[in-house]
Structures are given as C-alpha cells and as structure tokens.
Image (cartoon, rainbow, N blue to C red):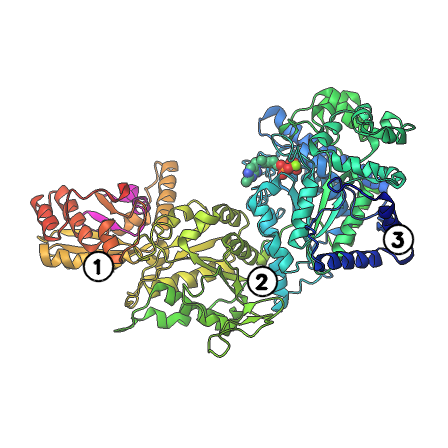
Amino acid sequence: MDRFPDHDPQETQEWLDALEAVLEQEGPERAHYLLERLIDKARRSGAYLPFSANTAYVNTIPPAKEEHSPGDHAIEHRIRSYARWNALAMVLRANKNTNVGGHIASFASAATLYDVGFNHFWHAPSEKHGGDLVYIQGHSAPGIYSRAFMLGRLTEEQLDHFRQEVGGKGLSSYPHPWLMPDFWQFPTVSMGLGPLMAIYQARFMKYLHDRGVANTEERKVWCFVGDGEVDEPESMGAIGIAAREKLDNLIFVVNCNLQRLDGPVRGNGKIIQELEADFRGAGWNVIKLIWGSYWDPLLARDTKGLLQKLMDECVDGEYQTFKSKDGAYVRKYFFGKYPELLEMVANMTDDDIWRLNRGGHDPHKIYAAYSAAVKHKGQPTVILAKTVKGYGMGEAGESQNITHQQKKMGTISLKSFRDRFNLPIPDDKIEEVPYLEFAEGSPELNYMREHRMALGGYLPARRRKAEPLVVPPLSAFDAFLKASGEGREVSTTMVFVRLLNVLVKDKNIGKHIVPIVPDESRTFGMEGMFRQLGIWSSVGQLYTPQDADQLMFYKEDRNGQILQEGICEPGAMSSWIAAATSYSMHGVSMIPFYIFYSMFGFQRVGDLAWAAGDSRARGFLLGGTSGRTTLNGEGLQHEDGHSHLIASTIPNCVSYDPAFAYELAVIMQDGLRRMYTEQEDIFYYITLMNENYAHPAMPNGAEEGILKGMYLFTEGQADKETPKVQLLGSGTILREVIAAAELLKQDFGVASDIWSITSFNQLRRDGIETNRWNLLHPEAKPRLSYVESCFRERSGPVVAATDYMKVYADQIRAFLPKSYLVLGTDGFGRSDTREALRRFFEVDRYYVAVAALKALADEEMLPKAKVTEALKKYGINPDKPNPVTV
Ligand SMILES: Cc1ncc(C[n+]2csc(CCOP(=O)(O)OP(=O)(O)O)c2C)c(N)n1
Ligand SMILES: [Mg+2]
C-alpha cells in the first residue's frame, strides 16, 4: 500500500467503512463480489490495475473459520514428543560408532505436519477406502521410522541400523522402495522429483477412474516438499498442469522452515509470499499457515493493521534469526520496531513472547488447514506452512545455518530437549540416548493404534504384487515371426505400432495398456491410434477437431486410452512411472508404453529413470529414432549414440536393440510375461528405428538367444582353407554387417558367421555374473559366460559394428577368447543421408569388411597387403580425420 500516497484520508475511510458494513452485515462473499465488480469497472474504464496474487502475511483461514480437531491434544503432544526424540536418537546413535550421517533438523521442523496427517487424515488401503498416497520428504525419514517403531512395526535393532543396510536389518537413509519394498512407496530424496511425480500420480488416478479401471474418487495424493526444494524447476515446472487438470485430489504441503542446506531459502524476501503468488497465479487453492494460535489474540487486537504491516515488512532472514535467539530478542528487534507494538506486548513475559508459535507447529491450525484442503473442489491445494528448522534442538541447531547437517548433540542440549518436550529420561541415561516407547495398554499406544485402524491400517506401507495378468503367447504375434515378404519394407517403429495394436485388442490385457506420447505420435506413425483409442481428457472434447471429417481425426475423450503429454518429457516419464507402479499403488497392473525420441529419453530424464528403478516400475520405454546414423537428416541434437549406455547404468532396466520384427516380438512377449505374469520388478528399454527394410523369418530356435542378447543369424560356408571371421551387428547396422559378409566373400574369399546382437548390455551382465562366480569358486569347474559359449567352437577373429559409441559393443571384450575389433559412432552427430553418415562414422559395410580383413591379418591369416587393397578398392582415405574430432 505504501506505493500509493493517501491524498484524501477521509474519503478512504468512507470506503473502508462501507466495506466494513458489508462484511459485517452481508458477509465476505458479498464483499468479494463487490470488490471484483469495482475492479472490473475500473479496468473497463481504462484504469491500469496490475495483478497481484499476494495477500497479507497472515493465515488464509481466519480463526473463526477453523475446523476444530476432534483429537486429544495432550496425548497427541506426548506421542509427537516421543516421535521427535526417537528420530533424533536414531541419528545420534547411528553416528556414535559409525559415521553414516543422518538428519535431525528437517523432521524436527515437520513433526507436527506429519503427526496430524497420520492421526486424522491419511487413509491406508482397506475395504472402505483405496488409500491415500503420501510422498514423504526424504530427509524426514527418521521421524517416519520413529513412529513405525512406536507402533511395533520396526524393532530397536532396526533403528540402531539406520543407514547400515548391508547386513539386512537396516533402515534406508531415505525413502527407497527398492531397499524397503514393504514400507516406502515413493523415492523422493532427489529434490524436485517428489512434487513432479505426485502431480502426475494425481492425474493418473483421474485417468484410471475415468477409464473405469479403478475407483480412485475418494483418494488423495499428499506431497511434502521442502521450501528449498522448490528451487528445483521440477518442483514448480508442472504446477500449471495440476491446475489445468483440476487435480483436487492433490495436496502439497510445503514445509517453510525458511532454511535449506547452506542457509536461508529467501533471506531477503519471503518464501511463503513468493510461493503464494506462484501457486495462485497458476490456479491453485493456496492456504497459508503462517501463525500459530498464540498469535490470535494479538492479531485480534491489531485493529489498525500495524502488526500485520510489521509482519509484511520483516524478511525471512530476520524471522530465522529471531528463532535462533530468545523472547527478549524478539521483543526488542521485532515488536520494538513500532512503539505501539512494544506496548501491545508489554504485559507479556519474554517466555510468553517466545511461545508465540508458527502455524506449522500448531496442531489445531494444521488440522484446520488439512480439513479445508481435503474438502476443496476443482483445484489442487498447496499448504504453505511456516516452521522452525531444528525445532527443539536449542543451541545445538534451532534455526541455525548449520542445522541441516547437525548430527551431534551434547548432553546439555539433550537435557534441554528432554525438558522442553517433557520426556521421561533420567539424567544418568541421557547420554545413551535411549529409545522411548509407550507401554502396551497405555493410552498413547491405544490412541495411535485406534486412529490408524480407523483410517484403515498403517502407513507407509507398500504393496508388492497385484493380480497377475494373462499375457498373450508368442503365437499371438505369429505374423511378425514370418518374413515380411518382397516389397514390404517397414521400420521397427512400424512393427512396434502393429504389435501395440495387437495388444490393445487383446481381451485380457487390452484395457491395461497405456500408450504415452510427448507430442510425437506422428513422428512414430501412431496417429491412427488417436481415433481408435482416443486421447484421454477429463473433459472430453469441447470443440470440433479440424480434421473431424477424416478417418483418423484428433479425438479427445473421457474414456481415451492414450496419454498425450505435450512437449514435456519429465511429465511423460512421471506418468509412465505412475502407470508402471500402478500394480502397487492401485492394486491393478497397467502396461505403459512410453515412446520418445531416444535422444530426449534417458539423458533428458535420467534421474527420473533412476527413480523408476528404485520404485520397482514395470513397463516399456521405447527409444524411437535410435542410432547415430539411422535417423538421417536430423543432426547433432537428435542422433543418439549412447542411450543404451545410460540404460545399462540402471540395474533393473533390461535393454535391447532389435533389428528385425521377430526379435521385437520375442522381446516384448517375454517382457510382458516377466513383468505382468511373473511380476518381476524390472522394466524394459527397447530402441526402435525409422529405417525401412524387409524383415526375414525367425531362424529356428532363435528365441533363447534373442532374449540372452545374441544368436547366430547365418553361418558362413567355409572349407579348411577359407579364412573365417565372426561378424557381430546390432540394430540396423546388422544389415551393413550382412552386406559386408557378401563383400568379403565375393571380393576376398572370406567366410563369415553373422550374429545378431540384440543386447550388448545383457551379454555383459551375464559375463560379469559368470566371472564373479568363477572368482568366488576358484576350485570349481569354471562356468562359461553366454558369449564364451557361443564362440567356443567358432574360429576366426571377432568384429562388431553398431550405431552407438564403440564402448557399447566393447562391453563384451573380456568374455571373448579371440581378438576383437569394434566399430561404432563416437562423436557428435550431424545431418546427412544414412549412407553418407555411415561412411563418415566408419560403420558402413565397407568399413566392416576392412575391419574383418585387418583382424584376419593381425592373426596372420591374411597378408596385410590385402587390407590396403580393400581400402583402395572401397575408396577409403586412410588419412581421413577421426569423426570424433570434427
Ligand atoms: C536434486 C538434489 N540436489 C541436492 C540435494 C542435496 N540436499 C539434500 S537436502 C537439501 C536441502 C533441503 O532443503 P529444504 O528443501 O528446505 O528441506 P528441509 O530440510 O529444510 O526441510 C539439499 C540441497 C538433493 N537431495 N537432491
Ligand atoms: Mg527448508
């Protein structure tokens, strides 16, 4: 308001009095209406009124509108105090003997926010309710364990093994479903992924409901977010989507303790005000939960708005400093700014002033905010709760910049913590930091149990399996196992789309398929599915599509099956994770197929792919237009030569680079079986290409090799005198290898065995496993890796060529008894024809032939002059610059 000088205070007062009268007699809704009309009138008359999404720095819900908690507050306080202590104890104890780290201050600030949720709001899955989903902030894990311990869900021994998981009794540092598959549901500790995944989870629940797959109506997604965490673009980047999709099943709780790891979040500003404007601007329902009940009488007496003015003026850096000091300091430096306010608190002691609490520590206010949030319709809700980082830690960390990593507390601090929370620990035991439990039959334990039972059971808890699905046998894909026939040249992408078409029509699993595309359907020839399956939209289609008169028009539908994500790979990946973990979160397996430009896959959303592994996701990722030379024309940013390498870093990601239709059919069928019938916690990454060619029939008995990673495609005919090579090819480059074998035979009389390598990644995994076994069983008969067993009775050097970096094929070197020469596409891509690119990157048939001759020459099976002859014959300049350097 200071921006506008008041030229006529009397007139101002008249308007304010008029408003006051409306508020009193007709209520706030009428007042709101009149104000909106006045603003509208002013704007229509040409006045420039810039939008402000901010309200005063006070609670959104006034005391008179607060819904009262039905809980027993004394009992809840005791429960919470024990929870605080145990959380702290497990970190201190874990660090006494080992140096494994842990966090105290985050949960200390959030304890009441969690406690109210556990006691009153969060449903576990039961007969009556599908269960709420709670994304817990990673660094609050000790507090969650602490509560589970008090309920008898975890033992003291487990608590003592916090962050010491190797022996099998430990507790994960953070929420990791991979490591604690019955407990944690969502991996959240990589900042920003929790909020992003929660938004798409809430959206996916609406999708499931609209499609009639699962009833998700009463269920909510709660997501706890750190105020520092909102710095991540992933945290804030999708909030507009949540509002647009009207996700009223979504509640964010931002724990605004004003600090992150190094220091203040917004020392010079106010994080709550900043977020209020961001979320309101995006269309969210915003509930500010700033001040606790002890402030209510002061605010009620603040008729001139001076206290509110001071609250507005004070920045977060100051608010943090206040809570690191004491009541006398707050009196002097906060209230002391205005003599009237100093007067207002004159009859309060310093202790009274210190007790003025923040909203996020007040169970009554939290209850009121939560109950308003769960009732709100038509919008997602964010609760901005102001708290104190390290609450209760006193001089050991409360509101101190160092507090985030504080994992030690001296005896004096522990004693004052004990006294502050009235904990029954005698002085002579304090240094042991004993865990506290409520005795069987105590009112506190009964209270905790009864409240959880009323809400359906314990949380967090994770479901490991759903009903298995009956997946089609390989014979359902019979058409793909035969040769495509003369003139029927198709890409593996087209083959995939046809396979998907078979699957969506399958009577057992058709309904479970979730095709996910980030605005690339036309790129992959999937536009036919728009009409056939429909694009899911919660409002259906409110317009006549431009192409309505065409067979394959752009159809949006409430029952649509396709998730069209727009140009948002992190969002598409989050949808995929929601679908891929649906077996656990919703008790019904979904089969997501997310297809993307391989270059905008793992390297764009790598950390989400890692979280998918941790989440035990089951589904298919399809890297379309894969390879450095196979996507002609697109150039450096599009041509991918390394996604398989990134895929190989995720332990439960199974990856393949098939060349032919039957390979893809075999791989997909087996993936369906493993993930949805056997319910293995793995997911698939399969690369697809856009090069059209004819597909041969499946060689007899090739299935096993296709799945293991290699099989003999054709055998070279050779007598004893004929030199022989083993040629390995992957993806479309297999076709260059096949052509190279022809050149070798015709031009140099060399015979080749040709192997199709469907996965160098899988071959390496098998080899590593075999070597490991041999290492640990030195006197047993050594086992052979699959690669070794393939080449045991084969002669001639081995040459491999792929459309990826050389290191991809190089992965099996250790398991090859012979010399091994690898061709690959290291370097930046560029646009040109496939032919020119393959020559440039030295992976075309001529280079394969030259490499084979060189390998034979190295083994003295051919004179070196033959290699020179081939270079000349195929027009290869030996002084051509290395493609990596240009
Ligand atoms: C992507 C990512 N970057 C950095 C970190 C390291 N880190 C862990 S906690 C933290 C500070 C968190 O502050 P805030 O979000 O405010 O949470 P608080 O502990 O204050 O509740 C940081 C930087 C991380 N876990 N994830
Ligand atoms: Mg913080």
Q: Secondary structure at mark 3?
A: helix
Residue type at the position of mark 2? Glu
Q: Secondary structure at mark 2?
A: loop
Q: Is residue 370 magenta?
A: no
Residue 33 vs residue 640: left or right? Answer: right
Q: Nearer the viewer, mark 1 or mark 2?
A: 1
Residue type at the position of mark 1? Ile
Q: Is residue 553 or residue 29 the one in the foreground? A: 29
Per the model, the C-alpha gap separating discs 2 and 3 is 64 Å
Residue 321 vs residue 665: left or right? Answer: right
Residue type at the position of mark 3? Ala
Which portion, as a residue range, is magenta? 792-817
Taking the image in four quarters, ligand 2 sits in the one at: top right
Q: Is residue 798 magenta?
A: yes
Q: Quadrant of residue 130?
A: bottom right
The residue that mark 3 highlights is 18
Is there CB contact under 8 Å for labels 1 and 2? Answer: no
Marks counted in the figure total 3
Q: Secondary structure at mark 1?
A: helix
Looking at the image, which residue is at 53% across and 63% down? 563
- Mark before the other along the chain sequence, 1 or 2: 2
Let me know if residue 63 appears in the view: no
Please tell me the numbered disc located at residue 738: 1
Is there CB contact under 8 Å for labels 3 and 1? Answer: no
Residue 173 vs residue 503: left or right? Answer: right
Please tell me the numbered disc located at residue 651: none
Is there CB contact under 8 Å for labels 2 and 3? Answer: no
Q: Quadrant of residue 82?
A: top right
The residue that mark 2 highlights is 467
Q: Quadrant of the N terminus?
A: top right
Looking at the image, which residue is at 80% across and 31% down? 421
- Mark before the other along the chain sequence, 3 or 1: 3
